[in-house]
Amino acid sequence: MTTTSDPGGRGDLKAGVPAVTMKDVDKWYGSFHALKDIDLTVARGEKIVVCGPSGSGKSTLIRCINQLETVEKGTITVEGIELTAGPKNVEKIRRDVGMVFQQFNLFPHMTVLQNCMLAPMKVRGTTKADADATARKYLERVRIPEQADKYPAQLSGGQQQRVAIARALCMNPKLMLFDEPTSALDPEMVNEVLDTMIDLAQEGMTMLVVTHEMGFARKVADRVIFMDRGEIVEVGEPESFFSNPKHERTRTFLGQISH
Amino acid sequence: MIRQFGITEFWFIVAAVQWTLALSAVAFAGGAVGGMAIALARVSEIKPLRYSALAIIRFFQGTPLLMQLFLAFFGLRILGVEINPWIAAAIALTAHASAFLGEIWRGCIEAVPKGQSEASWALGIGYYDRMVSVVLPQAARIAVAPTVGFLVQLIKGTSLASIIGFVELTRAGQIINNATFSPFTVFGIVAALYFILCWPLSLLATRMERRFAVATRR
Ligand SMILES: Nc1ncnc2c1ncn2[C@@H]1O[C@H](COP(=O)(O)OP(=O)(O)O)[C@@H](O)[C@H]1O
Ligand SMILES: [Mg+2]
């Protein structure tokens, strides 16, 4: 049999289950067509950067993946589970999909440590001791272990965003979504957050990142997606995407953000 | 025969404070439970629940408390339920407090930024834990001052229960006034007693408001 000459067959089969599949997805806000016929497959371990003008549907796109937004048409499958099939699946998948928001969205009435411990304890039923240990491990990873007992408001923006990343990681997610994680930060704090994200990428995390940080995209992305008016206009590897964009709209956009 | 206003009359009025307090406490405790249910129904994702809660709120906001008392007292009697003024007043004021606290707390829950719920959803946290651990603790900070403010209104509102014959502070005043005919003294004392009950609460509300403002600025 010729198939026996494929030693990578089993591995490929496993890698063949994509982290995310979006098929013919359409989304409306009332009469506003926010996502138009989106088709996207994200492989496990893949890092994807999404860019595009404000209002083009970037947030909507990634928020559909953990069903913070529901879609009217098409199917979304995450880790082999079809989300659009019912609320039970949504609950199941949200535990495995971490999300980092532009505005951090830390819980202000809890310490950094409590922020990180809440979901593992309440959702996964982790014991307090284990949740504590996990939280401290990830706070170490994002390089702020000494802030564990402070409240979010006592931290800088960059520190808060790193806590938000640690909080998501404490759930041991299979996939991480980032919605403009550095857009609300003072410029001098952008790099500490990007560095944390680069570390995460190098550890093999599957990541979908909405960002206009093109340095990050070049360094980390396997593919860059350009969105405009609810459509995926162009998808490419960073090298060709930046040096040789195919579409006029992409060129215009890249021209605008590089100035 | 007109009696002199003396120490006995004075103590009769003061003693009635306990009934004002008891009625306020029952209505407030019941109203807290009912109010929480109404507030949660108002922010629920289930439409019929939202609208039923809204209907309840509109009814109690749109009718005088006195009518609500009459309905509870005379209405239940017409239905053949023999009801004493104390129970009727407690039912009416509890329902009244539920509707008002429900509306106050709905506002407080909605004042918690949407991002807090979104972060909870994104972490897979379910309805119960999202409410108990994330949303309600933050709403509670905002709720303290208006809630104490409403409690003051409620204490003063119990005076209306005098009309259906429940002997609380105001009714005790009327009884003594009918016997002594010294309205200025009697109702002066009654007013002073209400003030003594309500003023510390107003102070407390202001203090707590300030403390939470400091705590959240931390
Ligand atoms: N909840 C909503 N209701 C109505 N319109 C919305 C809502 N959220 C987003 N939109 C609209 O959908 C479009 C895409 O929004 P969004 O995905 O946030 O864009 P981006 O993240 O690319 O800036 C925008 O025009 C925005 O105004
Ligand atoms: Mg956005």
Image: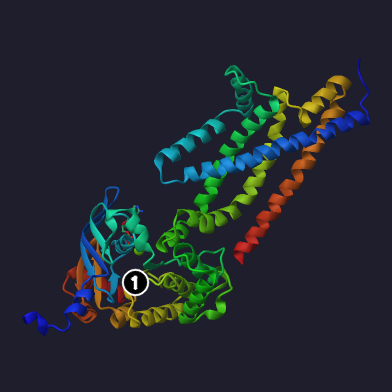
Viewer-closest of B30 and A40? B30
Percent x, y of residue B182: 87, 24
Q: SS for tag 1?
A: loop
| Quarter the N terminus of chain B occupies | top right
In the image, what residue type sits under mark 1?
Answer: Lys
Badge 1: how crowded within 10 Å, few (<14), some, or many (20+)?
Answer: many
**Looking at the image, what colour scheme do you see?**
rainbow
Q: Residue drawn at (24%, 73%), measured in percent from left and top?
A: A43
The quarter of the displayed image where residue B60 is located: top right
Residue A68 can be seen, yes or no: no
**Relative vertical location of residue B85 with respect to residue B37 in this rendering, above or below:** above
Percent x, y of residue B181: 87, 21
**Relative vertical location of residue A242 with respect to residue A117 in this rendering, above or below:** below
**Relative vertical location of residue B91 with respect to residue A178 in this rendering, above or below:** above
Residue A74 can be seen, yes or no: yes
**Relative vertical location of residue B201 with respect to residue A156 in this rendering, above or below:** above
Per the image, the residue denoted by label 1 is A174
Q: Is residue B208 left or right of residue A258?
A: right
Viewer-closest of B179 and B188? B179
The quarter of the displayed image where residue A18 is located: bottom left
Q: Residue drawn at (26%, 62%), measured in percent from left and top?
A: A77
Q: In this view, does B80 lie to the left or right of A54?
A: right
Viewer-closest of B206 and A87? A87
Ligand 2 quadrant?
bottom left
